[in-house]
């Protein structure tokens, strides 16, 4: 049979075309597959990098204490879904639960002792601390249930946060218009008008019916025998006294807590005491002992006599002993402190200057324990909420807050004297 070359050529061209087309399709598909794989690898890599960056951000934003960077949302976890249940104001410090191993799933931080969360994006670590002195107070025999969707406040009645759910809590502080309760590991205040129910409960904890305030003057360190006066204290005496208070877990108060106790706003543990120091001479030598035993004290400072820098310590509160009226012989009777007979203008100028110098303190101490109705009225007018005297009696609820008594501590008093005050 005669072969037609043209037909053979056509068939070969067709076969070659099919092969080329098949190869082209294969190559095209292979390129697409490779591109898809490359894109997937790229996306996976980008996702891993993004996830790693988020984990780093989560780690950087986590701390046991954080601060909100803006007004932000509060969430509750509903089977893995975080639902908005409230809001927190800007610059509010929050305490968080400990996270042992931070991962991508740690994007919401749980608030300590609560069921609420914040997003890691909304907070940053802070060195600010939350005042937890309220944990030493004795709760009132009252339990409240708040209304839903209300605002909670700080001690200055600035807004902290709002919650859509109601809260059930014991009462820690009882003011005229507010209750103080523990929420989010801090003391917060709720308006009494925002409380839906108050229930009386049993309270088995012992509380103080009275509290002592003690008064020291001048400390002389070992080897310094230049003062033999009964109000000069040896280093050994101060160390023994402060160690005794620390060993017996005595709660050392500040002046605002004393005023709240007098007003009946807080209940204090039975073992409570206010440590005060008068004048300012050598007072900086008390600080190492306060810090060693973690005790609080109040220095009633003659504010024109000494630099405040010498008394910087978180354990030492500064209050007023006048600006420059701690001088004898100015007025008749007693030791003659000027606060009892100088003109109103002179006294008010001195007292207001002292308050301004001491960062607006509300606590005052009369020089030489001497006072009168005249001086008390001027102390009130100058903006003080309370004033201390002598008297050697304990502080009771309901007493005149401008005649708060103290026990002067003398150089020969041992720890048995303190024991009779705080343990008997």
Image (cartoon, helix red, strand yellow):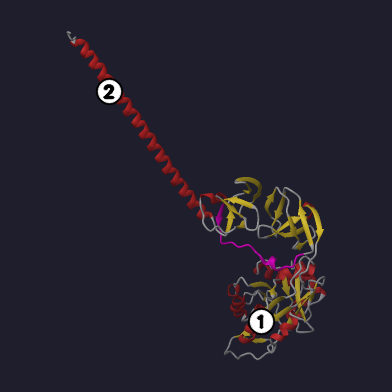
Q: Position of residue 312 (x, y in %)?
A: 59, 72
Q: Nearer the viewer, residue 7 or 314?
A: 7
**Which mark's residue is nearer the viewer, 2 or 1?**
2
Q: Quadrant of residue 38?
A: top left
Question: Which stretch appears magenta?
Answer: 123-139
- The crowding category of the residue bearing disc 1, from other C-alpha atoms within 10 Å (few below 14, some 14 to 19, many at least 20), is some
Left or right, 388 with respect to 235, comes to right
Q: Classify mark 1: helix, strand or loop.
A: helix
Label 2 neighbour load within 10 Å: few <14, some 14-19, many 20+: few
- The verdict on residue 268 being magenta is no
Distance Cα–Cα, label 2 vs label 1: 99 Å
Q: Position of residue 227 (x, y in %)?
A: 63, 90
At mark 2, the secondary structure is helix
Q: Residue furthest left?
A: 2
Q: Which residue is mark 1?
A: 244
In the rendered view, tell whether residue 419 sits above or below residue 26: below
Q: Taking 204 as reference, is 185 above or below it?
A: above
372 relative to 363 in the view: left or right: right
Considering every residue shown, the one lying at the far front of the view is 1
Please name the residue that numbered disc 2 is placed on. Answer: 20
Is there a contact, CB below 8 Å, between mark 2 and mark 1? no
Q: Residue furthest top?
A: 2
């Amino acid at each position: 049979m005669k072969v037609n070359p043209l037909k053979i050529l056509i068939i070969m061209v067709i076969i070659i075309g099919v092969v080329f087309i098949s190869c082209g399709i294969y190559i095209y598909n292979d390129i697409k597959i490779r591109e898809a794989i490359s894109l997937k690898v790229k996306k996976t890599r980008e996702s891993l990098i993004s996830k790693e960056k988020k984990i780093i951000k989560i780690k950087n934003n986590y701390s046991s204490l954080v601060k909100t960077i803006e007004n932000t949302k509060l969430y509750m976890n509903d089977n893995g879904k975080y639902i908005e249940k409230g809001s927190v104001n800007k610059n509010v410090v929050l305490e968080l639960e400990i996270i042992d191993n931070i991962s991508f799933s740690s994007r919401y931080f749980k608030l300590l002792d609560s069921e609420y969360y914040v997003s890691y994006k909304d907070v940053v670590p802070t060195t600010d601390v939350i005042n937890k002195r309220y944990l030493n107070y004795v709760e009132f025999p009252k339990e409240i249930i708040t209304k839903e969707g209300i605002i909670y406040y700080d001690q200055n009645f600035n807004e902290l946060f709002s919650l859509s759910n109601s809260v059930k809590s014991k009462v820690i502080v009882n003011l005229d218009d507010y209750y103080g309760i523990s929420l989010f590991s801090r003391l917060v205040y709720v308006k009494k008008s925002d409380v839906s129910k108050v229930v009386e409960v049993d309270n088995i904890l012992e509380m103080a019916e009275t509290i002592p305030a003690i008064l020291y003057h001048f400390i002389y360190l070992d080897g310094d025998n230049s003062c033999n006066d009964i109000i000069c204290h040896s280093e050994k005496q101060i160390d023994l006294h402060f160690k005794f208070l620390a060993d017996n877990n005595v709660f050392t108060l500040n002046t605002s807590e004393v005023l709240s106790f007098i007003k009946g706003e807080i209940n204090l543990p039975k073992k409570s005491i206010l440590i005060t120091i008068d004048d300012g001479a050598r007072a900086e030598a008390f600080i190492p002992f306060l810090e060693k035993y973690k005790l609080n004290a109040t220095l009633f400072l003659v504010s024109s006599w000494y630099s405040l820098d010498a008394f910087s310590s978180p354990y030492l509160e500064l209050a007023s002993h006048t600006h420059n009226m701690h001088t004898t012989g100015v007025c008749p009777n007693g030791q003659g402190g000027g606060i009892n007979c100088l003109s109103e203008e002179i006294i008010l100028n001195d007292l207001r200057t002292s308050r301004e110098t001491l960062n607006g303190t509300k606590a005052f101490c009369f020089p030489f324990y001497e006072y009168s109705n005249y001086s008390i009225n001027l102390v009130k007018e100058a903006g003080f909420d309370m004033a201390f005297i002598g008297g050697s009696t304990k502080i009771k609820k309901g007493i005149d807050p401008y005649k708060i008594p103290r026990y002067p501590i003398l150089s020969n008093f041992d720890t048995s004297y303190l024991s009779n005050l705080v343990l008997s």
